[in-house]
Image (cartoon, coloured by chain):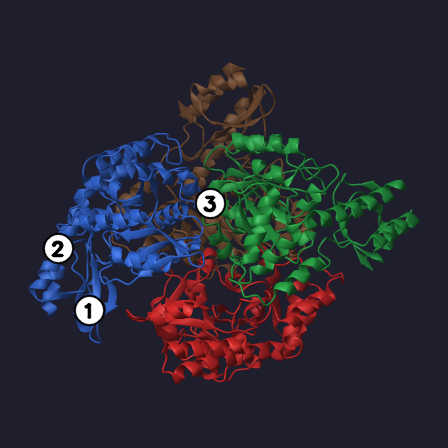
Chain colours: A brown, B blue, C green, D red
Amino acid sequence: MYSFKNDYCEGAHPNILQALIDTNFIQETGYGKDQYSLKAVQLIKRHIGREDVDVHFIPGGTQTNLIAISSFLRPHEAVISADSGHINVHETGAIEGTGHKVLTMNTNDGKLTPKQIQNILNIHTDEHMVKPKLVYISNSTELGTIYNKEELVALRAICKENDLLFYMDGARLGSALCSNDNDLTLNDLPDLFDAFYIGGTKNGALIGEALVICNDSLKKDFRYYIKQKGALLAKGRLLGIQFIELFKDNLFFELAEHANRMAAKIQKGLKEVNVAFLTESPTNQIFPILTNEQIEALKRNYDFELWKKVDESHTAIRFVTSWATKEEAVDQLIKDVKNLI
Amino acid sequence: MYSFKNDYCEGAHPNILQALIDTNFIQETGYGKDQYSLKAVQLIKRHIGREDVDVHFIPGGTQTNLIAISSFLRPHEAVISADSGHINVHETGAIEGTGHKVLTMNTNDGKLTPKQIQNILNIHTDEHMVKPKLVYISNSTELGTIYNKEELVALRAICKENDLLFYMDGARLGSALCSNDNDLTLNDLPDLFDAFYIGGTKNGALIGEALVICNDSLKKDFRYYIKQKGALLAKGRLLGIQFIELFKDNLFFELAEHANRMAAKIQKGLKEVNVAFLTESPTNQIFPILTNEQIEALKRNYDFELWKKVDESHTAIRFVTSWATKEEAVDQLIKDVKNLI
Amino acid sequence: MYSFKNDYCEGAHPNILQALIDTNFIQETGYGKDQYSLKAVQLIKRHIGREDVDVHFIPGGTQTNLIAISSFLRPHEAVISADSGHINVHETGAIEGTGHKVLTMNTNDGKLTPKQIQNILNIHTDEHMVKPKLVYISNSTELGTIYNKEELVALRAICKENDLLFYMDGARLGSALCSNDNDLTLNDLPDLFDAFYIGGTKNGALIGEALVICNDSLKKDFRYYIKQKGALLAKGRLLGIQFIELFKDNLFFELAEHANRMAAKIQKGLKEVNVAFLTESPTNQIFPILTNEQIEALKRNYDFELWKKVDESHTAIRFVTSWATKEEAVDQLIKDVKNLI
Amino acid sequence: MYSFKNDYCEGAHPNILQALIDTNFIQETGYGKDQYSLKAVQLIKRHIGREDVDVHFIPGGTQTNLIAISSFLRPHEAVISADSGHINVHETGAIEGTGHKVLTMNTNDGKLTPKQIQNILNIHTDEHMVKPKLVYISNSTELGTIYNKEELVALRAICKENDLLFYMDGARLGSALCSNDNDLTLNDLPDLFDAFYIGGTKNGALIGEALVICNDSLKKDFRYYIKQKGALLAKGRLLGIQFIELFKDNLFFELAEHANRMAAKIQKGLKEVNVAFLTESPTNQIFPILTNEQIEALKRNYDFELWKKVDESHTAIRFVTSWATKEEAVDQLIKDVKNLI
């Protein structure tokens, strides 16, 4: 049994575990003021090419989204999101739990457009309705798709015109940035977003996301929010040490590239036998459509998500690859699918 | 420079790091449904001697408190706490952040009494005031003191009579249970408390607390709350693996015993030169009172907390020992203090 | 200029004002424990035909919805509503403000169906998503339509099967119950709903809604919630006195019947000249579709809402009638519209 | 039986009821945009002598406090209050219900001092604790006392130095301003406070408080908050009409003066027979200390609050007078107390 169920099936990249061991008995200050966290912040700033951003490490993605969004908004302000957005579907109402409505638009590919944002703005015009204030996107999206730079510039423009904050959930930012279709770099992000996060958990870390706040007006007192929501780890070193490993060289990118390459290989292999896909994904999540019988057969040896019923006899499934995905498992999967067809 | 600032200066016990390495490439389900978390739950139940409790692993203490308390209470219900309680002072209003008032009583030793609870009940009698519903204690307390069984039985009784939930913050439960003055065991706890947590972070883990829910009526849907507050780790294995190490044998207790022994040694050494203490602490936090000059001198070689101004020339400081505290550092500290006196 | 903009353009029915004067100098207890509120509760229970319900008076509709729903739900539980539901659109995120997600389904007529509820239940199956727990409907709906008894019985059934609470926003319940198409009575409601409210503000009162809680498990401590949200009026008599007037005889129903009759007259008049309507409304809100030129002309003498653009040249507008609508104004309106066509 | 239990035993001043009747059938816009509310705002601005403040009408005091405070603060910010403050004791945790901690200081007379504020600031210094941000006072206080101008200027100064907002609960502001000991005017208030409210409910209105926002940075989007908390009345005219009556001439002050005069008369009468008082109150709440037997005897003919046990045989009770208190009832009360002594 091999799992393509998600990108957090294994532990951490061995370099990270080694670094934990190497630093284990060095005494450090708590709560993210340790030397490792400080150094990791510097490394990330260098990768981004900007000194004037704030970087905070937070254990998980849902937590990062809820802390950031609830601290950025006043009580009557709402978030705009694709209806497939992680905050709208898979965070158990965490954003609403902090008091804010999530306004959604239906999309096929998980990507918001300026027109959809404009539609929401058009109907939210007075104090009887919430005030849209923050646009949430994920990149890569929950459907494996990515935004190109032109699309983000256009979204940025409508946000700016309408005094909306622009925020990116980067749980799978590594995979997005390392995708063949990508034309973005970390350097572009501070000009595009008021804040975004760089996901560690799904790209080789045990836990940890790096929230980058670019808009000065959102920086003040941010550690209070992290603490109030219970996310200021006593042993904050655990996060700093991991992000040093990911960013001291290019491990973060190498791991994402491996994941993408594995997904692309599966995709290519399956297309050779004319398997259709739910979306065109250039990242580490792919959504082949198979017959229910084929899926049953695959289940015997593989773990994966059933994504969406396509018709009575076909279902889209999701394969996710990661930094830890073994190429021989990918080869075997391709072979096994081909045999089923 | 040696730090007695807290019990989270170092990383994790080496057994834990080794276990992370040993299991690293085994593929597992996410979100706490992995084999390690399941096994750790079983081990904790065995240590407690009860199968009918629910055990959940949560990354940190503030988070555990806020998730538990906010899920246990209805909106108008309040918590009773000593005014020194961690939830009242050092959680940045996390409990109020979930909507609940913390009603406090002043104590000298950090310990609540039935009489104090009764006083609060006496004045909260109608719907113009919050309804006290949950008694929060920490054991050991923020002042290093512990509750004995008789005290807890009495608190339990007043809670039961008044339909109050009884909850224990066990961030330093290991130290409390391994104290020389202690007459409690893990086995006693389910009969005393509706819920409590066993702290890992301050007793050898990298992160992680084990919340034990004893009262059936509080168990339902609890994983929803963990998720909504962002505390359901994708790689939940990180918590399970650590608690297996702590509880597969008696590592949890051995580590706490070491911490207590180190604190007792310092306390004994300092008493030999007539240093006074703010509280009589049988646990790993001790509060010697020194002159401001002595403190300045100590600061050159040691890191510790200034706790409380006692008079113009004296201040209570806090030394905290841990599983990782080196005996030679303790010996040197005693020697250095003696030299100052 | 005559206003058909809403059903709260005027003050209160004269009987209500007279009763305020008659009782003005009688000293009474505060916070809804006055003799008037107690009597009004008894009158409402008698009209409903049930002694075992709790009745609470709350100043406004948004407030009633937010207090009821937030007190009925635990933090992870969500509301199911038509996307046109008042709580979803026109309450400035009041429900989310209390921490709960509103899950919506698109409807043409503002009415939820069991099938739509089932669809939402089908996709909310684990702790990564909110847990649907309460079905919210409004009757009459925001589109003037009403539910018949058979429809409500079917909704009740699916709620019961799935442990969902069933709640009705009755801001315009008077108009619904007095509609010609209606087959419901107040007596039916406790068997159908866990809670519902009887709207006073839009049917002759200055302010005030009567929340009726039928499900025993929702009754406990309810006055705490009213107080905590700031809705327990010091001079609660203001609400009690009004509801006595509405329910001591049948004023509540007479007022709603007048409003419905006025709306029906307009509808009939306009249909005679082939004006189309957005929905078939048997209540006091009607939605004629006119050309933009006709609308501009009408605006000179009438106040009303623009509801929805139908095509480039046509828009649906909303006329609302009330207990205070003058028949001569209605006749003039019909004449004026006919002249435009 | 005559009630001195509170200042909301009766309905409204007859002028107010007459105004409701006179305006009843004039059609008006909803939600506080009616001509009456607009006019009342202008009248209040004129009385204050400032055009650059925002005035909002809100049904009740708890509601005004919770809306103002929750909209002024960011999530980690806390309120400083006397422990006797209404928000701390008698609002069922409404402030905590919006997520904010109330930090309290013990007082004898219900009045905060700069020193007490400084003490709280001294211990709240980092992100592990809430950040004090708003000072709440009530004037008159819950103990009948008032602040003089010098005291308020000193409080203002410490607030300004420490970037704290200064907010006054004016539920009984009329009584405070009309007290013989008072040296404040409405004109002074915008220079002293960031926001305050003028209480109507306890001074002749049926319901209604006028919130005055002086600090520009707190004004934006305020109607959203009112609506989100359910306090934007459809028939907002109800509030506007009342405040016109209170402020078109000097009715507001005349009513408060009457209440104060009645309280002073009782106080003088009782002092003649050497009754002691819990506080020196120059306003409409007075706190005589009587023997338990005297109190039992008084209860037969009067309604009042038991305030505080003074010793085994004595209790402080509270008499509250109002605009509607009859002088003959006051005379009788004095006579009856004298007879008991």
Relative height, residue C108 to residue B328 (above, below) = above
Which image quarter: residue A245?
A: top left
What residue appears at the point 69 percent right and 41 percent down from the top-left corner?
A: C177
**Which mark is nearer the camera, 1 or 3?**
3
- Name the one closer to the observer, C161 or A316: C161
Host chain of mark 2: B
Q: Residues within 10 Å of mark 3 (few under 14, many from 20)?
A: many
Secondary structure found at label 1:
helix
Secondary structure found at label 2:
helix
**Which amino acid type corresponds to the residue marked 3 in the rendered image?**
Pro
Q: Residues within 10 Å of mark 1 (few under 14, many from 20)?
A: many
2 or 1: tag closer to the N-terminus = 2
Q: Give how far apart the Cα atoms at labels 3 and 2 are.
A: 44 Å
Host chain of mark 3: C
Q: Give how far apart the Cα atoms at labels 1 and 3 are.
A: 48 Å
| Residue under pointer 2 | B264
| Residue under pointer 1 | B295
x, y percent for residue B284: 19, 54
What residue appears at the point 46 percent right and 31 percent down from the top-left corner?
A: A321
**Which amino acid type corresponds to the residue marked 2 in the rendered image?**
Ala
In the rendered image, the quadrant that contains the N terminus of chain A is top left
- Residue C75 is marked as 3
Q: Is residue C285 left or right of residue C62?
A: right
Host chain of mark 1: B
